[in-house]
Image (cartoon, grey):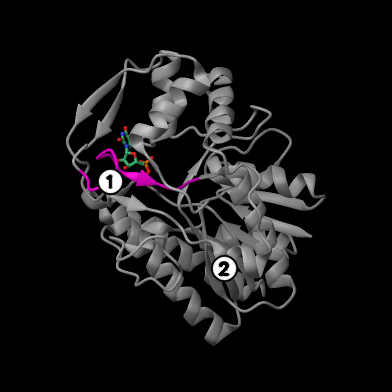
Amino acid sequence: MKFLVVGGAGYIGSHMVKHLLLAGHQVVVADVMPAHSGVAWVNLDIADRPALDALFASHRFDAVFHFASFIQVGESVSDPGKYYQNNVAATLCLLQAMIQADVRQLVFSSTAAVYGDPQYVPIDEAHPKAPINPYGRSKWMVEQMLEDFDRAYGLRSVCLRYFNAAGADPDGMLGECHEPETHLIPLILQAASGRRPAVTVFGRDYSTLDGTCIRDYIHVNDLASAHALAIDYLQAGGASTAFNLGNGEGFSVEQVIAAARSVTGRSINVIEAGRRAGDPPSLVADASKARQILGWHTQYALLDDILGHAWKWEQQYPWR
Ligand code: UDP
């Protein structure tokens, strides 16, 4: 099949592109950053409707994967316009171009942030959607738009609600590289490698086992395999729906730091800080729906594997 991967130069998108190419599919990446060498890349912002129309006119895509969005919760609070423009308005532009080009299957990168403060854990897909920041609201708005686009135009979609994407491709050639980096695991590993003096722990007064926040870390390659299954599901005529993607096991910030010390064999300095705004104490997925309906199985559920692969990437990091 032939796929358009929007945001295919980014962290999760680049792992997806590799997965699709290894499975023998044709892939075109649309991104404002260059894709990895050897991958067909179009320098395109999805807010640019004429450029999108030209792209759809020159390729016959079977489906679209949409990974292109801004992801920083704090920034979404201070600059919500940026998030509603890129994550919502530009996505609407993409959807309209898809309808015009008669491409009616989409896998959309959503997030556990659509749930807001959990009313119960593990969180299943039926949990109330009450996002507590513009980032989560932007993703939930798109999910609702997609429901309407299915009803009105027959665009079928799968929304994949990621918990904490982490890890790196095991061969060490792909990995996480955000600028600025705000995610826990890369920051811990940068402290381990000496690129940072320490990692900051945001809050030790949560109602958790050791007082630090609990998250469900899911390997980026396991996310990629779920996306591939989501396309199979849509190809087989599956109805539009959403799936949680997580391991169903939570680790505290303290536990992740301890595991990283053991995996890397390095000392990791810690700085204590207060709570970060907008952090729920515990986010853990109930991903049984993805297992049952998509037949999804995680390959790298162990935190040590997630950390080990991310550590390999950190050590090969080309700009070190
Ligand atoms: N965290 C931390 N120090 C950091 C970055 C993150 O203590 O430098 C904590 C954060 O408060 C949260 C967890 O680690 O409880 C995961 O944060 P991350 O930003 O990686 O992902 P999020 O859960 O926000 O999607």
For disc 1, the marked residue is 208
Q: What label does residue 289 carry, if any? A: 2
Q: What label does residue 86 carry, if any? A: none
State how far apart marks 2 and 1 are (Cα): 26 Å
N-term mark: 2 or 1: 1
Q: Amino acid at mark 1?
A: Thr
Magenta residues (range)? 206-217
Classify 291 as above or below 298.
below
Residue 183, quarter of the rendered image: top left
Task: Give the farthest residue toward the right.
Answer: 24
Query: Where ligand 1 lies, by image quadrant?
Result: top left
Image quadrant holding the N terminus, namely bottom right
Q: Amino acid at mark 2?
A: Lys
Q: Position of residue 135 (x, y in %)?
A: 33, 56
Q: 94 or 186, which is in the foreground?
A: 186
Label 1 lies in ligand 1 vicinity (Cβ under 8 Å): no
Q: What residue do we see at 37% from left, 18% from top? A: 268
